[in-house]
Image (cartoon, grey):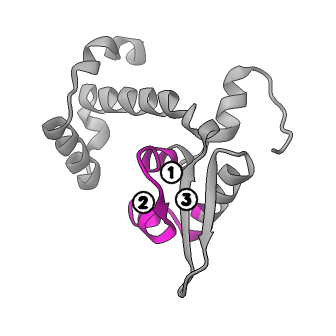
Amino acid sequence: MRKVEVSCPITATMNIIGGKWKAVILWYLREYPLRFGELHKKMPKCSLKIFNADLKELEKEGIIKREVFAEVPPKVEYSLTDYGKTLLPVIIILRQWGVKRLLDFPELMKDNEELQHFIKVISETEDLSFLNNLKVFRNTING
């Protein structure tokens, strides 16, 4: 684990999951291990350079495990460690809050067909009862 400046418990957490793709990586590894290519296909807009760097950082922090199988061609699989699984409640609530925000502010999805499709699929296939417990008020943002 790397030593970083931490000013509060929130920064201690954000030092691990901060950035554009780390929380997404953890989300996709929440249920089962994935091979490198399978995981990257789920995030096609993430450059290989950033993807590799994020995987290495998460592995170094003990959040994910990289397992190399002695096969030809070599097989590499990533999974959450037990320690990494303790972050899942955080990742789940971040995702729920994001879904709620996008549903409350559809203009945020304007000109983003991929995100519109993603939210449509979530709306049609997932239990969204959690939305009742999250309140995002437009007047809070607009003052």
Q: Amino acid at mark 3?
A: Tyr
Estimate how packed mark 3 is, as few (under 14), some (14 to 19) or many (20 or more) residues with alpha carbons within 10 Å. Answer: many
Give the image location of residue 35, x and y in percent.
48, 66
- The residue where tag 1 is placed is 25
Q: What element does badge 2 sit on?
A: loop
Estimate how packed mark 2 is, as few (under 14), some (14 to 19) or many (20 or more) residues with alpha carbons within 10 Å. Answer: some
- Kindly indicate whether the residue at mark 1 contacts the one at mark 3 (C-beta within 8 angstroms): yes
Give the image location of residue 105, x and y in percent.
28, 29
Quadrant of image for the N terminus? top right
Q: Is residue 143 above or below residue 68?
A: above
Quadrant of image for the C terminus? top left
Tell me if 119 is positioned left or right of 14 in this view.
left
Q: Is residue 90 visible?
A: yes
- The residue where tag 2 is placed is 43
- Kindly indicate whether the residue at mark 2 contacts the one at mark 1 (C-beta within 8 angstroms): yes
Rendering quarter of residue 6: top right
Q: Is residue 45 visible?
A: no
Rendering quarter of residue 61: top right
Q: Foreground mark, 3 or 1?
A: 3
- The residue where tag 3 is placed is 78
Tell me if 1 is positioned left or right of 105 in this view.
right
Residue drawn at the location 70% of the way across and 37% of the way down:
15
Tag shown at residue 60:
none
